[in-house]
Amino acid sequence: APVGDGYSLGDPQAERRRLFQAIHQALRPAAGRVNVLILEDLHWSDPASQDLLLHLARAVEEDRVLIVGSYRTDEIHRLHPLAALLARLARDRHSSELRLAPLSRAELAELLADTLGADPPAPLVTALYERTEGNPFFAEELLEALRAAGAPGAALPEPPLATGALPLSIKDSILR
């Protein structure tokens, strides 16, 4: 039997559309307010999530809603399912891309100083920079692994950051 919105109960497409519309309504901000939706790791998103993102990108055009999505460009190849969505969003002018470069050695030193609460020793900065190429996630994970191994900053294991010393979180990320 048709429902008030013209869709039939039990119709999967109709139920999906109602769900997407309900999510859009939940995102709409109160008068004078702005809402921000942050979606991380879009490179791992499934087709239904990508369909929802496309729907929301179109639906929020008149709303004060900002949708921020992150993905790893090195994970996206031309046949990756997200590549088609990114191209469509760009073509329809529903997106702007901001690429984040790796941290410089000085920026990595600043990140380490904030994390450690003191200026990091130069050998630590050099070792982490060489091993992570400025990737902040990898740098933080390796620093945490060093701290867990009892090397809180100045006392680096010999040799520093040997290739076999990757934390499980980094190994998992690389394998994905």
Image: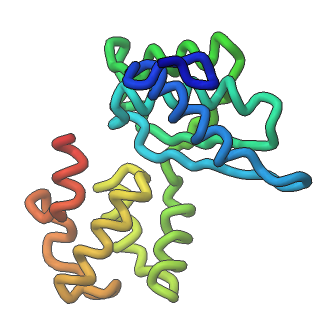
Along the line of sight, which residue is nearer the eye, 93 or 166? 93
* Vertical side of 84 occupied by 36: above or below: below
* Quadrant that contains the C terminus: top left
The answer to whether 156 is drawn above or below residue 96 in the figure is: below
Q: Quadrant of residue 6?
A: top right
Q: Quadrant of residue 56?
A: top right
- Front-lying residue, 55 or 26: 26
Horizontal side of 116 relative to 38 (left or right) equals: left
Residue lying at 48% horizontally and 21% vertically, measured from the top left: 14
- Give x and y (percent) for residue 150: 20, 88
Find residue 149 and report its image quarter.
bottom left
Q: In the figure, is residue 143 to the left or right of 57? A: left
Does residue 27 lie above or below 107 as drawn? above
Question: Where's residue 125, x and y in %?
Answer: 40, 69
Outermost residue, right side: 32
The front one of 50 and 26 is 26
Q: How is the image coloured?
A: rainbow
Q: Position of residue 35 (x, y in %)?
A: 73, 52
- Residue at 52%, 21% in the rendered image: 86
